[in-house]
Image (cartoon, grey):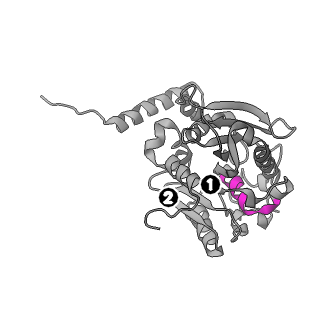
Amino acid sequence: MSSWIGPGPRGLLEMLLAAGLALCLLAACSPLTLLNGAVPDGASRATSGLAYGPLPRQRLDIHAPLNAAGAPVVVFFYGGSWRSGERADYRFAGDALASRGIIAVIADYRLYPEVAYPEFLRDAALAVAWIQRHIGAYGGDPGRLFVAGHSAGGYIAAMLALDPRWLRDAGSAPGTLAGWIGLAGPYDFLPITARDVRPVFLFPDTPADSQPIRHASAAAPPGLLLTGAADTEVDPQRNSAALARTLRAAGACARLVEYPGLGHKLLVGALARPLRWRAPVLDDIAAFVARPCAPSPGE
């Protein structure tokens, strides 16, 4: 007689997630819907559809802890190759940050083909400037405001933090930021090889100063660069590792964290409640927000 020992808690969770994902795909829903479905009702206070500008895509949602008072703020920009994305799809990211006492702002911005570079940067800068003026009414501390993003959104966060043009034109400045957080952002991607990205950046006339790495300087706010070692979409070494080295060489504070076995999408997915065990992405972000650029063990 043989016995079978079933999977442990993590293995069982993986099986359940895989089954849920399969059902989701059969129903033609987004995997993000599955992650958002794990957000418990009443976990945070959500304020949706606030206008930071006059255009339809210039809207944002605020996810605040239930007892926010002087809380730090993270303005998060999602990815999607500057072509796709909706703030409602990233409720799980807002929930994650709010669960650590951080007010999360998820902002929409205009996408290609409606606009091309640099208009989405102008939108993002307007959103940050609006939050700096108004977040106090939602319990946030504008003096502890961070910009963050995943993939294309990480690019946006980096450009707002490193290139002073965009926040300055919106009535703010990178010096007003407490720091910035990039999750698998593309920071050095010339010449552009991805055909769907070429028109977004005016190929073949892409400006050289469209690259975040060109703007590394000692004046940069503290940075946290997160990446997955298994990322095959945005090269971790050319982008996150290289920008971290360049910022440090310039005299800026930049932390680099690379997670073994983590791919491009799972890096942001690890913020969701069912996937947080895969990597301490949320822990590392919360620690950075609490103490920007404090040395980690071994540094």
- The answer to whether one can see residue 36 in this image is yes
Provide residue 297's location: percent of width, then percent of height: 44, 63
**Mark with earlier residue (1, 2):** 1
Provide residue 192's location: percent of width, then percent of height: 71, 60
User: Which residue does the image show at 40% across and 34% down from the upper left?
Assistant: 13
- In the displayed image of the protein, which residue is found farthest to the front? 69
Pick the quarter of the image with the N terminus: top left
Q: Quadrant of residue 32?
A: top right
Q: Amino acid at mark 2?
A: Glu
Q: Assign the magenta stretch its main secondary structure.
A: helix
User: Which residue does the image show at 86% across and 38% down from the upper left?
Assistant: 55
Observer-nearest of 295 and 25: 295
- The answer to whether one can see residue 79 in this image is no
Provide residue 182's location: percent of width, then percent of height: 62, 55
* Magenta region includes residue 2: no
Disc 2 packing (10 Å; few <14; some 14–19; many ≥20): many
As helix, strand or loop, the secondary structure at mark 2 comes to: strand
Question: Where are the magenta residues, as a range?
Answer: 154-165
* Magenta region includes residue 160: yes
Say if 117 sits above or below 243 in the image: above
Determine which residue is flagged by label 1.
181
Mark 1 → mark 2, Cα distance in angstroms: 13 Å
